[in-house]
Structures are given as C-alpha cells and as structure tokens.
Amino acid sequence: MRDAHLTINPTALLHNLAQVKAHAPKSKVMAMVKADAYGHGALLIAQLLSPHVDALGVAFLAEALALRAAGITCPIAVLEGVFNAQELALAFEHDCYLVVHQAAQIALLAEYGGNQKTLIWLKVDSGMHRLGFSPKDVLNAYQQLVNLDCVEEIILTSHFACADNLDSPKTLQQLAVLDELACQLPSLARSFANSAAILAWPQSHHQWVRAGIMLYGSSPFSDKSAAELNLLPVMTLKTPIIALRAIEAGESVGYGSTWQATRHTRLGVLAIGYGDGYPRHITANTPVWVNGQSTVIVGRVSMDMITIDITDIKAELGDVVTLWGENLPADTIAPYANSISYELFCQVTPRVRRLLKL
C-alpha cells in the first residue's frame, strides 16, 4: 500500500488549547475549524474540541452544516455570514451564530419571518479593510440589529491585520478604534483576539478569543518558534521510502535535471509529491527527518514522489520519513516553500490518509 499519511495527535491539540486558556483565562474560547480545521480534519478536530470550548468557528455556512450533519452540537459561528434568505433559514434551523459585516445581511435578518433567535457578531473594519462596517457606521448598524426579534445578543468583533508583528503600530491603532466604539457600546461583549493577539496582546482578550493556528501547534510569529511558545505539533506528515538508488558524481536527479551529484550518492525515493499537497516549488536542501536523523530533498518535487539524499544516514527500504510535524516543525519547512505553515496544512490532499495518534 502507498502509505503517505498524516497523524493527528489529540494530546497535543488539548495541550495547545490549555495554552490558549492560560493566556486568556477570563475569556470564552472559539476554536477555529474552518478550511477543514486547517487541513487537520474538521469533524475529528470538532469532536475533540467541542467538550472543551465555547464555540467553533467556520468560514461559511456549508462548513457549519457539514459539522451539524455529522452530529456536532457545539455552537458554531459562521465568520462570513450568510448571503440569501435560504442560507439564513438554514443557519437558524441549525443553530448557527452569524457574523454580520454589511448592510445587506442586516436586511436579510430584518426580513426573516421565523421565531428563532441567534447571537450576532457585529463586525467592525478597524483597519484591515477586508470585511466589516466602517467605524462611523457601526452605531447605526447596532441600532438596526438591536431592534430585531431574531437577534438574541450582539457581540462586537473585528480582526487584526498585524498582530503577529509586535513592531507594527497597526494593532495599537486598531485597538484605539475598537476601544472608542466599546465606550459607545459598553453593554456589548467583544471578540478581537486571534492567535497572535492571544499570545502577545492581552489588552485585546475581552470576553471572547478566537484561537486558530496556535491550536494546531504552529507559531503565528516569524521570530518565535512554537516550542518557545510551549505549543506542540498536532499534525505529522509521513511517508515511507519506496525505492533506493545510487548515482555517481555528475549524474542528475528528477525533472529538469536541476540537481547534480558531486559524489557517489545514495538516494531514497519517497511516496509523496505535490499531488498529495507537498509544495512543488519547495527548494532543494529542504530538510526531512529519518530514523532520528536529518537529511535533505534533492531534485524537484514530482506529482507522486520526492527524492532524498541518504548517503550519510542510516535509512533503508520501507523506513518512514517525516516531512513535517514531530521532530521537524512545519514552521521550519514553510520558508523553504516561501510560505507559511497555514498553507502547508491546508494543502494536504484527500489521498493522504488521516490517522489518529493513540
């Protein structure tokens, strides 16, 4: 069997959640499970986290409905909200919290004829300029929402653009905008903090925090590792060596013959490639982990295979190689792909088997 697989470590996941709660002990926690829980498997992660968090967060309604269909009963917030009456009816039917970020969504709520209520997360564009009401329009939006029978509670929410960069003035500028609004709407609970803000901006925590990448054991900061933040990798991507080769100095490896041996070289061929979500554009000399030893990729990543240099390590046919995860953080690999761990996680394709670490 071709056995490219990833393992999900529930102990690491709950450890990381404990770090969220340690940093924001007075806040409720929304666990982000959008984008298939950052590639970790939304249903599995939701099942593991639901007993321990106050809500789950998804990007759009279909993600919420899939979790409900699978039996998840934990509150679910839909971060992009809904966009027509049919979606709104489904959101109420399946007990979803809704983010409202534009006037058209208020109009949908005003036209709702049912008798159900939900929590509305009133989104402010405090400076990221992606979604949300302009600060000058927030009070008007609030007044429209607070008078609707279908609105049970309103929570003020926003998103930080640069919370991962402690040298940027942007977060303090956004906080100033949000603090001013909070003074005008003192009765509203607030939800501003993402993973970076949970870890670095305690003044942003308030009543709700939204934990994403830190739950999965990756650092939101470029200058601080997950280990330094006491975070553990939840996903480990592995595959076996399926063939051994030996080439001489001057011979090349892979498409385009981009890598050339400078000595007698022993090679291992791995059963994984860009068809599995491993980045094609990753550079040569990207590390992998084999039998407690580090070595590197040589040649281009193919659709189904990768070649590694095993000249100086102990490695044989069938040995399992770690591409990222335990012993080799995704944060270490991401720069070789000119990317971030979020993207690595989300790109793993369905043909890679998902296994639960027992």
Image (tube, rainbow, N blue to C red):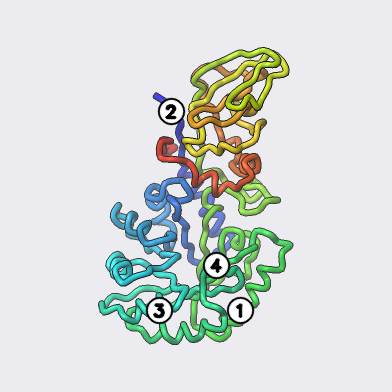
User: Which secondary structure lies at badge 3?
Assistant: helix
User: Which secondary structure lies at badge 2?
Assistant: loop
Nearest to viewer (mark 4 / mark 2)? 4
Check whether the beta carbons of the residues at disc 4 and disc 3 lie within 8 A of each other: no
Q: Is residue 296 at least partly visible in the picture?
A: yes
Determine the CA span between mark 4 and mark 2. Answer: 40 Å
Q: Is residue 192 above or below residue 35?
A: below
**Percent position (x, y) of residue 48?**
41, 50
User: Which residue position is annotated with label 3?
Assistant: 106
Sequence-first disc among 4 and 1: 4
User: Which residue position is annotated with label 1?
Assistant: 179
Determine the CA span between mark 2 and mark 3. Answer: 49 Å
In the depicted view, which residue is nearer to us: 101 or 179? 101
Determine the CA span between mark 4 and mark 1. Answer: 20 Å
Sequence-first disc among 2 and 3: 2
Sequence-first disc among 4 and 3: 3
> Residue placed at 60% from the left, 66% from the top?
160
The amino acid at mark 4 is Arg
Quadrant of the rendering where the C terminus is positioned? top left
User: Which residue position is annotated with label 2?
Assistant: 3
The amino acid at mark 3 is Ile
Check whether the beta carbons of the residues at disc 2 and disc 3 lie within 8 A of each other: no
Determine the CA span between mark 4 and mark 3. Answer: 18 Å
Sequence-first disc among 2 and 1: 2
Residue farthest to the front, as pictured: 256
> Residue placed at 32% from the left, 67% from the top?
87
Q: Is residue 293 at least partly visible in the picture?
A: no
